[in-house]
Amino acid sequence: MAEYKKSVGDNINQVLDNIKSACKKSGRKPEDVTLIAVSKTKPLPMLQEAYEAGSRNFGENKVQEIMDKYPQLPSDIRWHMIGHLQRNKVKYIIDKVTLIHSVDSLRLAEEISNQAQKKQVDIDILVEVNIAGEESKFGTSREEVFQLVEEIAKLPNIFIKGLMTIAPFVANPEDNRKYFRQIRELSVDIMNKNIDNVTMSVLSMGMTGDYMVAIEEGATMVRVGTGIFGERTYTNTQ
Ligand SMILES: *Cc1c(COP(=O)(O)O)cnc(C)c1O
């Protein structure tokens, strides 16, 4: 396909500039927002380019892909599991990832806790909330999230650091502002319950189409794929 492509490094600088503007607009500090380069389906050389441009946080949504890429890239990369995680695969990534963003059931949290104990590591997680109540999405409902947080908090070796959401796919990012705001309000409500071992310091929300709005509403981690690596092409094996 003959199309003009900017380099991964240029794209990252553009995204970082946008993050700065969104922070300025909302009176926040750019260093309080972590950019996660979502590298799913992308080949190693592109991840290397992002690494050379300064990226140290990468997001993947498949266990197999993390296992393939992990040993081939520098060890100071922080890997984020952002996709739906099956319980039988937790054991493969438990000692490789910095943060699991997609915990939405007690059964999954129990398996993460068990595997963390086995490997003698502590693992940080986020609870994924399906804030718009979309049928097609994973995540706990905003009604169930309180009980889920309280139950996960009792498990050993697993620490809740905040909330994650995947907002609806919309043409106008302003349409998602209310959902980002609701996630932030939910995190404040949870914080006010003072549950042992639970902090709400991380809000993982905002993707290529809407990360600036998410930052204005309090995101501390934005997950950007297309805006850094370009469109993804999926093969039928994925
Ligand atoms: C793919 C993915 C992203 C990145 O999406 P883009 O629109 O390409 O930025 C972010 N979060 C999750 C959970 C994803 O699966």
Image (cartoon, grey):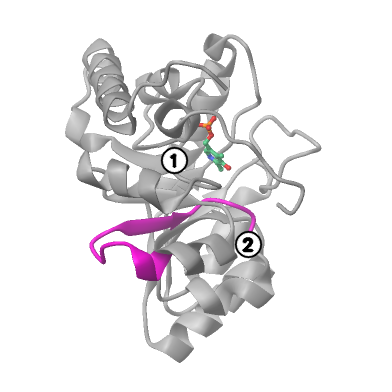
- Could you say where residue 118 lies in the image, as x and y percent from the top left? 47, 90
Left/right of residue 105 with respect to residue 230 in the rendered view: right
Location of residue 130 by image quarter: top right
Check disc 2 and give the amino acid type.
Leu
The yes-or-no answer for disc 2 within 8 Å of ligand 1 is no
- Could you say where residue 23 lies in the image, as x and y percent from the top left? 25, 20
Q: Is residue 221 magenta?
A: no
- Could you say where residue 96 lies in the image, as x and y percent from the top left? 40, 71
Q: Which mark is residue 204?
A: 1
Between marks 1 and 2 in the image, the one whose residue lies nearer the viewer: 2
Observer-nearest of 4 and 185: 4
- Hey, which residue is sitting farthest bottom in the picture? 118
- Residue drawn 44% across the image and 40% down it: 204
Check disc 1 and give the amino acid type.
Ser
- Residue drawn 52% across the image and 51% down it: 82
Q: CA distance from mark 1 to mark 2?
A: 17 Å
Vertical side of 56 occupied by 132: above or below: above
Observer-nearest of 63 and 168: 63
Left/right of residue 207 with respect to residue 141 in the rendered view: left
Left/right of residue 76 with respect to residue 117 in the rendered view: left
Residue beneath label 2, please? Answer: 85
For label 2, the SS is loop
Location of residue 131 by image quarter: top right
Q: Is residue 192 visible?
A: no
- Residue drawn 28% across the image and 35% down it: 33
Badge 1 density bin: few <14, some 14–19, many ≥20, Cα 10 Å: many
- Hey, which residue is sitting farthest right in the picture? 135
Extent of the magenta region:
70-84
Q: Which of pointers 1 and 2 lies earlier in the amino acid sequence?
A: 2
Observer-nearest of 27 and 167: 167
